[in-house]
Amino acid sequence: MAVEWTITIEGKNEFGDTCRKELRIDKTWERLFDGDVGLSVEDGKKIMAALQSAVVNHEAETYAQFRRPCPDCHTFRPVKDYTTRRIRTVFGTVKVRNPRWMICRDCYPGMDGALAPLKEICPDRAMSELMELTARLGSMMPYRQAAKVLAEFLPIEPTESHATVRKRTIRIGKRLDDQIMRETWRVRSQMDDRHQLEMQLPGDRRKEFVVSIDTAHVRSAEPNSARNFELVVARCGRGGRGEPGGRYFVTGSTAQHAIRDRTLHSLREVGYRGFGDVTVISDGAEILKRLPRAMPKPTAHIIDWFHIAMKIQPMQQIADHIVRSRSDPFDALPTIDRDIRAVKWRLWHGRVDRAIRDLESLLTGLKQPQGNAEFSIARLHSLGAQLLTYARSNRGAIIDYGKRYRGGLRVATTLAESAVNSLVGKRMVKKQQMRWSLHGAHMLMQVRTAELNGELRNRLRAPLRQPERNAPLIFKPKPPLLRAA
């Protein structure tokens, strides 16, 4: 025994034309014994594919008819030919009739050309929603897995392979990167107009713009390049600890102007207008030191306290072990644990010169002969030398962290570290056994960044291009009065 369901789809356009299409679905009673109740995923795919085909064909025909009249004399342009165009959508590939109209011979005598109206609304032969969905999945998971997810839940043909997902993701990333570059040029040209839109209130934590920046290492796929390359990852915002961190940005270029332009673009989105308190927090890498020097003044550079603390922590553990052991050759170092705590206290309160002198004295004491020196002494000396070098090279960027912390301001690159983990680590490093080109990684990161900033859909919904003109402007006929003059 079988039950037949008939679904009727009917649409009417602006010209009064009616389109009707019927779809039949057969269901048998035997399937109920297997627990197959209601419509299945395959039935849903079949219904949505039929509905999409009817709607797309109707809309394509309506737009083609709308573009047929000449915009100058309003007469129908002659037909050149009719072809078939395949448009990929989230509910399958749809074949539509693709007419091409000739250029009006009365308005443009002597010119020969054709206009394809469907190319204006679908230049990529795929709907923008499918492009967006493909790019989002491709930026979140491996390309092969993204292709399987698309085929599992959408009526997508097997031609939507991992290569297609990769190409679309890179293409969307290139489109987003071009948009950001255009906006960056406008921001750079407007930097002379230096004013803020808010009042500078004393003690207001939100008057400071904070840039937490870090680098991420990605395995390189280029045979003639280094083993790894770096991506600059940052989060720009305003406000103190516990408040939202702001906008993300990632760039594959480590040039000074490229990092500066991306930073200014992100800061402008959170209210920066070229004048205000800007603080750059980094781990002291040479690549990241270029940013504070290129930013508008005043811009302060702060070394991340987390990296300083992590260099002191193993020294403190070794020193505590030395004091607890109370045996040769440790009798000559009875206050080593208190000395290291004093160095940490002075660095926390911004007393860099005194901390450097204490470290130098500490290292000098560790060089003295200690009998049969153990591994702990050598390890402590090595870590102390590294901390001394780090403090000397970043002397000007070590501040009074205690005062800044009590004021409710940020003292660490926690936001940048989390950005590296969420943007780069989960997709490119971690457990992913894959290699990347610099171009592909940069474009993929633009998609992930736009998605994490919550603006991917809005950016892709922007007009892709203006409708193509019937003829170049130099051939456009002049109005009668202007021609007579």
Image: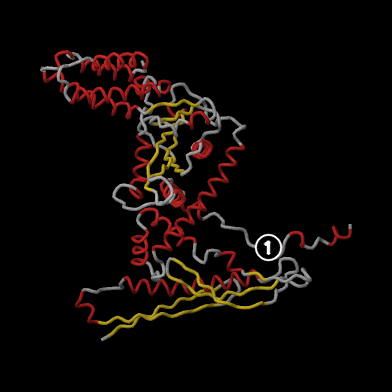
Residue at the disc numbered 1:
469
Please indicate whether residue 175 sits to the left or right of residue 25 in the image.
Answer: right
Image quarter in which the N terminus is found: bottom left
Amino acid at dot 1? Arg
Residue 38 image point, x, y percent: 28, 73
Residue 215, by quadrant, is: top left
**Residue toward you, 405 or 200:** 405
Disc 1 on helix, strand or loop? Answer: loop
- Residue at 36% from the left image edge and 30% from the top image edge: 412
- Residue at 55% from the left image edge and 33% from the top image edge: 273
In the image, residue 252 sits, relative to residue 170, either above or below, namely above
In the image, residue 356 sits, relative to residue 14, either above or below, namely above
Image quarter in which the C terminus is found: bottom right
Residue 206, by quadrant, is: top left
- The number of discs equals 1
What's the colour scheme? secondary structure
